[in-house]
Amino acid sequence: MTDVLLCVGNSMMGDDGAGPLLAEMCAAKPAGEWRVIDGGSAPENDVAAIRDLRPARLLLVDATDMGLNPGEIRVVNPDDIAEMFMMTTHNMPLNYLIDQLKEDVGEVIFLGIQPDIVGFYYPMTPPVKAAVETIYQRLEGWQGQGGFATL
């Protein structure tokens, strides 16, 4: 079975580009056996492709305002996303995307990176870049929740 890494975000909006940066790093030097999809700011466009893959595991990575310090990483229960009113810059709430995929995916892990600055043409901040690097380094031997704490 396939494991899919869905990287979400907009690389033109500062820290919201965390997901696309992770996808770029994986394209340059693959880490583990992940099938990487750069979902950009409209990850709902990738639902059909993910369904066709029928992955055992879907790891969704996105910059997510969780009220933490910039660069902190947490696993968020997909069922809690809507209730938490999480800030997103995407066309559709991520809980809707996850609900669309639950029947075709064995396990969904939502990994949020706390952004600092999300705004057009801002550079990505160092804490968020470091968080992306940490996630990238853990992809190779990923087990469970990758060693990240739950929000």
Image: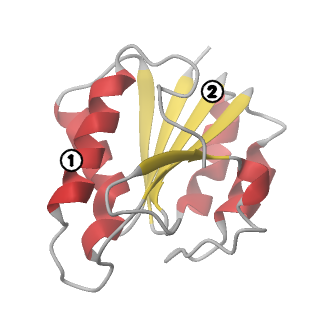
**Residue 112 at x, y = what percent?**
49, 53
The residue shown at (21%, 39%) is 25
Q: Secondary structure at mark 1?
A: helix
Question: Label 2: how many residues lie within 10 Å, few (<14), some (14-19) or many (20+)?
Answer: some
Residue type pointed to by label 1: Ala
Question: Label 1: how many residues lie within 10 Å, few (<14), some (14-19) or many (20+)?
Answer: some
Residue type pointed to by label 2: Arg
The residue that disc 2 covers is 57
Question: 35 above or below 142?
Answer: below
**Residue 93 at x, y = what percent?**
67, 70
The residue that disc 1 covers is 130
**Residue 126 at x, y = what percent?**
15, 59
Q: Secondary structure at mark 2?
A: strand
The residue shown at (48%, 34%) is 148
Q: Earlier in the sequence, mark 2 or mark 1?
A: 2
The residue shown at (49%, 64%) is 64
In the picture provided, is 6 more to the left or to the right than 82? left
Q: CA distance from mark 2 to mark 1?
A: 24 Å
In the picture provided, is 126 more to the left or to the right than 56? left
Which image quadrant: the N terminus? top right
Q: Give 8 or 126, whichever is nearer the viewer.
A: 126
In the picture provided, is 21 more to the left or to the right than 50? left
Q: Which mark is residue 29?
A: none
Q: Give 133 or 94, whichever is nearer the viewer.
A: 133
